Image (cartoon, rainbow, N blue to C red):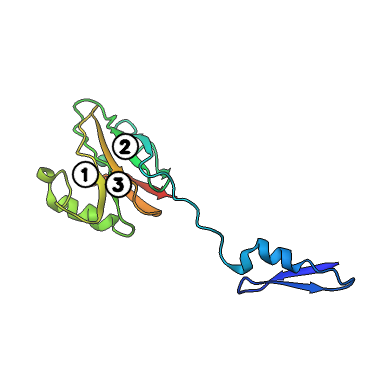
Amino acid sequence: MTATHISRRGFLRTVVVTGGLFVGGALVAACGGGESAPTQAPAASGAPVTLEIGSKGDALEYDKTSFEVPAGSKVTLNFKNNASPGSGVYHNWVLVRPGTIDAVAADGIAAGEANDYLKPNDNRVIAHTKLAKEGETVSVTFDAPAPGTYDFLCTFPGHATLMRGKFIVK
Ligand code: ZN
């Protein structure tokens, strides 16, 4: 017949309603007196993760629109351009910081083909492949950024509005 409550500050309170049974001491000890639990060991650093993505044939679409990887991963992403030979449809895969996708796309167009449609040394870009021609597979390996939700896109002119997705680090 004992009701226990945890206050907003995290301290355990025991209210003895009837019978005089006192269990609060043991519970407080088990809860560490309201202190937070021991910090968990971080995820193994550098655990390899391989991701595969391609374009949908000649369409200006990726065949995946989201990825999720554990924090601390060493990510290798392989992108295959599945466009028909001779179509002249090129693509890349570019991972960018939150809130920067449209600006990176616009600056990529301005940078031109000589720069693979990416502004050089752009600190909004976390990782990117080179431009893939029809049938070509390109790869990039990078450390997963801090936990959060990031965007990826193709910066080839005219593609970014259709070729984009979410990259989630947990
Ligand atoms: Zn593209």
The residue tagged 2 is: 76
Circles 1 and 2, Cβ within 8 Å, touching? The answer is no
Q: Secondary structure at mark 1?
A: loop
Quarter-of-image position of residue 100: bottom left
How far, Cα to Cα, is label 3 from label 1? 9 Å
Q: Secondary structure at mark 3?
A: strand
The amino acid marked with disc number 3 is Leu
User: Is the CB of mark 1 within 8 Å of ligand 1?
Assistant: yes
Quarter-of-image position of residue 86: top left
Q: Position of residue 150 (x, y in %)?
A: 36, 52
Image quadrant containing the N terminus: bottom right
Residue drawn at x 20%, y 39% as measured from the top left: 130
Circle 2 or circle 3, nearest the eye: 2
The amino acid marked with disc number 1 is Phe
As drawn, 85 above or below 109: above
Circle 1 or circle 2, nearest the eye: 2
Q: Which mark is residue 93?
A: none
Q: Position of residue 63 (x, y in %)?
A: 38, 36
Taking the image as shown, residue 109 lies to the left or right of residue 154, namely left
Which badge, 1 or 2, comes first in the chain's sequence? 2
The residue tagged 3 is: 153
Which badge, 2 or 3, comes first in the chain's sequence? 2
Of residues 46 and 124, which is closer to you in this image? 46
Taking the image as shown, residue 41 lies to the left or right of residue 8, namely left
How far, Cα to Cα, is label 2 from label 3? 16 Å
Q: Secondary structure at mark 2?
A: strand
The amino acid marked with disc number 2 is Thr
Please rate how many residues cluster around mark 1, counting C-alpha atoms within 10 Å: few if below 14, some from 14 to 19, many from 20. Answer: many
The residue tagged 1 is: 156
As drawn, 121 above or below 77: below
